[in-house]
Amino acid sequence: MINNDISEILSEGNKLRYQTYKSETMELKSNLQKFNPQTILDVWSGAGRIIQTCAVELPEANIYWVELDDKHNEFLKNRFQINLNVKIIHEDINNFLSKTDQKFDMILCMMNTISCFDEPTEIVQKLLQHWKYAVFTTCNEKYNLERMLMYQARGHKKITFDGKQYCLDDERSPWLKSRGRSEEELYEMVEKAWWKIIEFKELWILFYVILKS
């Protein structure tokens, strides 16, 4: 669907969802070709859309996905079982980073709440030690109200919003929190963690950021 223009036949919420996924995916494809990473770590990126994009664009690259959630792991193992370059690792990301000395060409954290990046905490410092480049996307607070339509279109039932942060508390996403941010907040966050921004874009309702360690 992302590779075709189907926006005219969608509801408003699904149109937002489609345009957001499409703009993020197209930008990621461009960056994968530009930087040509051969080892990729995908962190907290859902049901495999990002893994699939990486596997198609860079079929020789080794792609690692680390997640403790049982359902996500089972689903992804089944989805990518014939692709030997995709490694699905059922483990807490802190434990994984503590045990490996591998430096990944690129770490991806796409369309994520990035709540763990608010302060330069232990996991942030660990991630910093393991990447050459990092790509993350997060929601732009200017579109907080529009995001309600997108979450409804995704099938979430229990959605609350406190003016800053959404809480999606249902069987699909128990206790998932998603907060929109300002450009100023993101620059402050990056400065605290001693990263270097090499690209910063506004894509639909997302901020798209590339970092260099």
Image (cartoon, helix red, strand yellow):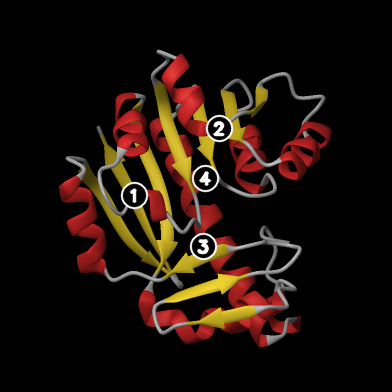
Left or right of residue 50: residue 83: right
Among the two numbered marks 1 and 4 on one chain, the one whose residue lies closer to the N terminus:
4
Q: 10 Å neighbourhood of mark 4: few (<14), some, or many (≥20)?
A: some
Among the two numbered marks 1 and 2 on one chain, the one whose residue lies closer to the N terminus:
2
Name above or below for residue 102 compared with residue 110. above
Q: 10 Å neighbourhood of mark 3: few (<14), some, or many (≥20)?
A: some
Q: Mark 2 sits on what residue? A: 92
Residue 8 place in picture, x, y as percent: 70, 83
Foreground label between 3 and 2: 2
* Mark 3 element type: helix
Name above or below for residue 151 compared with residue 97. below
Q: Amino acid at mark 4?
A: Lys
What is the C-alpha distance between the residues marked 1 and 2? 16 Å
What is the C-alpha distance between the residues marked 1 and 4? 24 Å
Q: How many marks?
A: 4
Q: Mark 4 sits on what residue? A: 29
Residue contact between numbered discs 4 and 2, judged by CB atoms under 8 Å: no
Left or right of residue 23: residue 116: left
